[in-house]
Image (cartoon, helix red, strand yellow):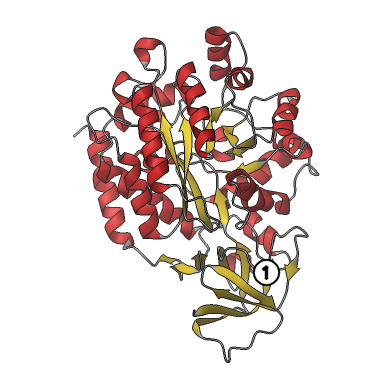
Amino acid sequence: MAGILIKNIREIITMDQERRRLKGYSLLIRGNRIERLAREIEEQPLALDEVIDGRNYFLYPGLINTHHHFYQVLTRNLPEVQGLELFGWLQYLYPIWARLTPEAVYYSTLVAAGELLKTGCTTACDHFYVFPGHQSAELLDQEFRAAAEIGIRFHGSRGSMSLGQKEGGLPPDEVVQSAEEILADSVRVIEKYHDRKPFAMQRVVLAPCSPFSVSRDLLRESIKLARSYQVRSHTHLAETKDEERFCRERFGVRPLDYMEELGWLGADVWFAHGVHLTTAEIKRMAASGTGVAHCPVSNQKLASGAAPVPTMLSHNLPVGLAVDGSASNDSSNLILEMRAAFLMHRLLAGISSISAEDVLAIATNGGSRILNQPEIGSIAEGQAADLFLVNCQRLDWAGGLSDPVSALINTGNSQLVDLTIVNGKVVVREGRLVNVAEELIIAAANRISREMVGGA
């Protein structure tokens, strides 16, 4: 089995349990794993596909995106929604998303996954929950197809909405499904795509959309089904005050209380956002092992608030980083997200509340913990060969090379990854995607976006 040798790396940021930083080390990839990490690794008699001179590179573990909506890349930067908070924003966009087609899902996945790979993200969880009634019910299959082609490690969430406007929910009725349809397709997707083995490239998550778009019965049955198949569960929770008012008025309790009643606390569950959680609720979640996907840019842009992440970390609650949907972020860039998280919590919780290294840990170790893939999120022998390299000989880093973690997060330039490797294979080289033609994807996505937004 041939491999890749990266020699004499200027500095490796391992994010292992000791958070070691290794200067002048070499790293050998064999198959899909890091086989050796040492000061000297001789090329001979190794059988190698490639030898990379690492003397000018910082090497980082691949970043892990724990919540996204890939399809939303087709509706980003729309002027009509720039001044809307979540509920109004959703009500404007739902009719546009009702025009999703299999082609739209496929190309939006390539766009979002490509942007992630080019900015250091090697594993992504996508929450897909819009299934227009006039389209194939197998839209999620297009995501798995595109993710495999582009080479990203992928956790695909079979999302759902069953509570339409006629039943008091937020989404229009043309994008909701019956609980029977949803549960049957959830079984199909798990049995077709979920890989339980370590180093899996594709796994399935069950992910009803939110308390205001899914029925009580579906939430209860979904978590039961997920646990019967031993897959993880995910949903939006405690994102806005509007959601909190909805739950109090409709169910008589706060959002977390409602989800706990339905069995939605546990180490196999994580929620997106967690902005409006009390310290007592954070303690309950931490005790159960329930995690949170932190989405700082989306939360700021939609004026949803700031999740109390330093408090979560102090109670050992699992926290991962996420870009959220591209229409509430307008980007799929975890390096930018790390900078936003770092600055947000420094501003709100004080200078000592969080460090740049803490934020990198959320984006690596935290994601590994939430997705239950311990073989990703750090650099060590035996770990998955998921990593990225940045050439430090660049104008925007000049004079600032003493701390590669601070350089990554604080300089403000997030379009800087030179090489990304996923599962032992190069997927980005010299800042360009290797497995797909970027120009063709761009053209297709722009055409589809025009058709959707224009109502064609």
**Residue furthest out toward the front:** 228
Residue 350 higher or lower than 84, as above or below:
below
Instruction: Tell whether 9 sits left or right of 422.
Output: right
Amino acid marked by disc 1: Ile
Residue 216 higher or lower than 97, as above or below:
above
Give the mark count.
1
- At a point 68% along the width and 72% down the height, the residue shown is 11
Instruction: Tell whether 202 sits left or right of 382.
Output: left
- The residue closer to the viewer here, 347 or 263, is 263
Residue 142 in the image: x percent, y percent?
32, 46
Residue 402 in the image: x percent, y percent?
73, 67
**Residue furthest out toward the right:** 352
**Residue furthest out toward the bottom:** 44
- The residue closer to the viewer here, 360 or 207, is 207
- At a point 33% along the width and 45% down the height, the residue shown is 141
Q: Residues within 10 Å of mark 1 (few under 14, many from 20)?
A: many
Residue 231 higher or lower than 336, as above or below:
above
- At a point 71% along the width and 24% down the height, the residue shown is 281
In the rendered image, the quadrant that contains the C terminus is top left
Which residue matches tag 1? 12
Q: Quadrant of residue 320?
A: top right
The secondary structure type at the circle numbered 1 is strand
Instruction: Tell whether 378 sits left or right of 145.
Output: right
Residue 252 in the image: x percent, y percent?
59, 8
Instruction: Tell whether 316 sits left or right of 212.
Output: right
Q: Quadrant of residue 455?
A: top left
Residue 364 in the image: x percent, y percent?
63, 53
